[in-house]
Image: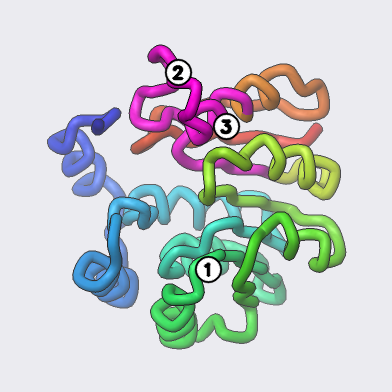
Amino acid sequence: MDIIPQKIEKYIDSHSTPEDQLLYELYRETNLKVMHPRMLSGAAQGRLLQMLASFISAKRILEIGTYTGYSAICLARGMDTLGELHTIDIKEELYEIAHKYIGKAGLENSIHQHIGDALDIIPQIEGNFDLIFIDADKKNYPRYFELLVERLNAGGLMIADNVLWGGKVVEDIQSNDKDTQGVIGFNKMVQEDIRVENVLLPIRDGLMLIRKL
């Protein structure tokens, strides 16, 4: 289910700074070789992530859900020139595509790829973060929030993708639908947490923008 009609998405893309050749090549290769290519952030969302990282001069970024590296490249392009980005994905088979394009972007020294369960890897990465982007298994969104909100610097941003989850957040929930339950639980948790302020943006499948107070 598309939250935003495809005609509107095309209009948005045509009125946003276009992706460069490298990101376009990554987009094409993802569509040709990888299942569920809509999981890729895409041009408009990628541009927004880059701008948000730039707005706050992010020096340390954590991404949960590398996929093929599109969003990691966008975030890293927006962060401080001496910044570092840690990105985690559980799918080892996607590592090489992401690694190839990270290298082509000249960001191999700035982006550190981790393969495995994010809940196991996060505690191994020391320090706090200026920006955290969550785009992984939806059932664990509440656990990611609990694990990371205290590691987000004051004034820092946490961004979560797919928080409208194809419109399922306003429908009856099936008892075995752990992903939808996770997204709804995350949205409620964020809304009620006095440590942050937040706005849910109707961008693609929904972006939750969270600022640490």
Q: Which label's residue is closer to the chain start, 3 or 2?
A: 2
Give me the disc on residue 173. Answer: 2
Using the image, determine if residue 66 lies above or below residue 144. Answer: below
Please state if 131 lies on the left or on the right of 126 as rendered.
Answer: left
Q: Which label's residue is closer to the chain start, 2 or 1?
A: 1
Query: Identity of the amino acid at label 2?
Result: Ile
Crowding around mark 2 (Cα neighbors within 10 Å: few <14, some 14 to 19, many 20+) is few
Q: Image point 29% across, 67% down: which residue?
A: 34
Which residue position holds label 1? 77
Q: What stretch is highlighted in magenta?
A: 157-185
Residue 123 in percent (x, y) is at 82, 60
Crowding around mark 1 (Cα neighbors within 10 Å: few <14, some 14 to 19, many 20+) is many
Crowding around mark 3 (Cα neighbors within 10 Å: few <14, some 14 to 19, many 20+) is many
Using the image, determine if residue 77 lies above or below residue 36. Answer: below
For the N terminus, which image quadrant? top left
Query: Identity of the amino acid at label 3?
Result: Gly
How much space separates mark 3 and mark 1, taking CA atoms? 30 Å
Between tags 3 and 1, which lies in front? 3
Which residue position holds label 3? 182
